[in-house]
């Protein structure tokens, strides 16, 4: 049986990925695995195909083993698929074992049995921030979201697709243990960009490489600091918002950052972000107001949008957002009212990477930007099946609605009940009641859980859109177009019965591919309007 995988090796602070021919690799306990580990300790520069990488890369579903040799810390970590006794979940669980290099004396020390019995489990290791000298008192901050828009539908779907595409990175918590690590910062800024619709869309499908493989990783840039400004909010990256000490440490980071600001600024809106949670903070000179902590990336985020992202996208991109009763667009006065056609003309003249800058030129332009789909010309969305799951109809005559206080899914009042009393406060949707979800103790993101959950849950159907008055399905592309896959011609020589799988849109973060590519497909019964 052929086993596949690769080596991650760190020496002198630099990580390298080492591939053998055709991705083949020796099994655990094999003499060649032991020999390779010794050889790499002695001379890394002689290894074939040692490619510099910013961080170690994770175990993919189609691989058997990943050997991570950290020469700086003198340990070897082996990642593999394994089912523990009593585990009845679909698929095999991501499993890791770590050994000190001084404890590896012979090939048998690297067998699966020896690893399971003697190795430490890095997936269970957690680092804790220093305890704080005293408690911080907070006042509550209520978060309420309004009716989603067509833009919300795309954002919620792209978030789910993003988690799906990069699930092997999100499943391996050892790759992003804290905000100082590059992968932690890159994943956080990607989620923020989707929530703020701060992205470019290109029709150049040639920049993609699908499906994502063992050599692919998030390459986009991220702020080097753990505290930075983003679309008018102060973002503070946090290790774990579920821990009281970590939450307080994040608040103190924000306060320290603000000490050098103009004293006339009396209040600052902050977003505390970890990969698995998000919270909102209002910092003022005499008060700290905090929202609840909301799940951001959860075990089910590859199939359904999380409450944290629904809130985050509303705060960062709703055209009518008001924070604490302050409407910033009201401060902007202009004697000239430009028609929307002028904004569309300007949009058509600027480069894709300038669209967001143009939108931030004024509050009026920003309102127009977030109430349209500027990166998708000639596209309209009439069905909001993800953002308004009750009926998917944004143009319902009844605009009154409520968001579930658990999952923050928005629904029309007329769709859910005729009893007005249940809509006043604390509404819990039928889906959350059925699954017995408790908002006070949301499910934690578990190592390997996203990939396993995706094995037995059906993914979202394509977003129904209208292009030039024809209804199409906008679908995520996870494989290359059919014409670029010669293996398909063995079964269908002319590809006449094979879906073309063409790529029409590629999502880009500041000039770098995000891992998201989409194509337009015909519906079973195409509709013209």
Image (tube, rainbow, N blue to C red):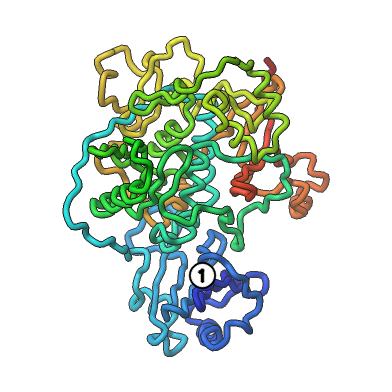
Find residue 523 and report its horizontal and vertical position in percent: 65, 28
469 vs 71, left or right, is: right
Find residue 55 and report its horizontal and vertical position in percent: 51, 65
Quadrant, the C terminus = top right
Q: Kindly identify the residue that appears in the image at 67 percent across and 20 percent down.
A: 342
Quadrant, the N terminus = bottom right
When asked about the image quadrant of residue 497, the answer is top right
- Most extreme residue toward the front is 263
Q: Nearer the viewer, residue 508 or 447?
A: 508
Task: Give neighbour class at mark 1: few <14, some 14-19, many 20+ (Cα, 10 Å).
Answer: many
Q: Kindly identify the residue that appears in the image at 46 percent across and 46 percent down.
A: 456
Q: Nearer the viewer, residue 42 or 171?
A: 42
Q: Is residue 438 visible?
A: no
Q: Nearer the viewer, residue 504 or 286?
A: 286
When asked about the image quadrant of residue 370, the answer is top right
252 vs 400, left or right, is: left
Q: Is residue 210 visible?
A: yes
Find residue 512 and report its horizontal and vertical position in percent: 63, 50
Q: Kindly identify the residue that appears in the image at 55 percent across and 73 percent down.
A: 7
Q: Nearer the viewer, residue 180 or 292?
A: 180
Q: Kindly identify the residue that appears in the image at 55 percent across and 87 percent down.
A: 39
């Amino acid at each position: 049986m052929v086993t596949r995988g690769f080596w991650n090796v760190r020496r002198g602070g630099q990580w390298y990925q080492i591939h053998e021919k055709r991705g083949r690799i020796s099994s655990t306990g094999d003499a060649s695995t032991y020999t390779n580990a010794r050889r790499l300790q002695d001379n890394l520069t002689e290894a074939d195909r040692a490619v510099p990488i910013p961080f170690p890369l994770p175990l993919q579903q189609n691989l058997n083993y990943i050997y991570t040799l950290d020469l700086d810390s003198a340990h070897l970590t082996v990642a593999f698929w394994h089912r523990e006794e009593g585990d009845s979940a679909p698929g095999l669980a991501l499993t890791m074992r770590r050994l000190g290099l001084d404890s590896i004396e012979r090939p048998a020390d690297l067998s699966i049995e020896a690893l399971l019995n003697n190795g430490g489990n890095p997936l269970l290791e957690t680092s804790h921030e220093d305890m704080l000298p005293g408690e911080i008192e907070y006042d509550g901050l209520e978060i309420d979201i309004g009716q989603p828009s067509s833009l919300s539908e795309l954002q919620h779907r792209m978030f789910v697709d993003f988690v799906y595409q990069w699930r092997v990175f999100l499943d391996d918590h050892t790759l992003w243990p804290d905000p100082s690590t590059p992968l932690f910062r890159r994943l956080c800024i990607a989620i923020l960009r989707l929530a703020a619709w701060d992205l470019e869309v290109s029709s150049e499908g040639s920049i993609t490489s699908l499906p994502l493989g063992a050599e692919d990783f998030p390459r986009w840039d991220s702020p080097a600091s753990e505290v930075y400004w983003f679309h008018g909010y102060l973002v503070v990256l946090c290790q774990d918002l579920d821990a009281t000490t970590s939450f307080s440490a994040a608040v103190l980071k924000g306060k320290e950052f603000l000490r050098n600001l103009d004293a006339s600024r009396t209040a600052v809106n902050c977003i505390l972000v970890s990969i698995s949670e998000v919270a909102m903070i209002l910092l003022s000179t005499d008060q700290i107001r905090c929202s609840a902590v909301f799940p951001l990336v959860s075990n089910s985020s590859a199939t359904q949008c999380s409450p944290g992202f629904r809130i985050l996208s509303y705060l960062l991109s709703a055209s009518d957002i008001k924070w604490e009763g302050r409407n910033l667009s009201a401060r902007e006065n202009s004697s000239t009212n430009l028609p929307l056609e002028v904004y569309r003309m300007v949009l058509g003249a600027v480069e894709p990477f300038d669209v967001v800058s143009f939108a931030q030129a004024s509050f009026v332009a920003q309102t127009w930007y977030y109430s349209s789909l500027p990166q998708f010309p000639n596209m309209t969305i009439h069905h909001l099946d993800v953002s308004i799951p009750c009926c998917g109809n944004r143009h319902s005559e009844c605009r009154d609605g409520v968001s579930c206080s658990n999952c923050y899914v928005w629904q029309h009042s007329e769709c859910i009940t005729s009893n007005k009393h249940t809509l006043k406060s604390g509404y819990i949707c039928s889906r959350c009641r059925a699954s017995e979800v408790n908002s006070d103790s949301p499910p934690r993101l578990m190592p390997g859980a996203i990939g396993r959950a995706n094995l037995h849950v059906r993914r979202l159907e394509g977003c129904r859109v209208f292009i030039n008055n024809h209804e199409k399905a906008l679908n995520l592309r996870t494989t290359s177009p059919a014409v670029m896959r010669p293996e398909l011609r063995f079964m269908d020589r002319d590809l006449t019965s094979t879906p073309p799988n063409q790529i029409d849109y590629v999502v880009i973060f500041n000039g770098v591919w995000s891992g998201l590519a989409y194509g337009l497909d015909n519906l079973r019964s195409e509709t013209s309007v």
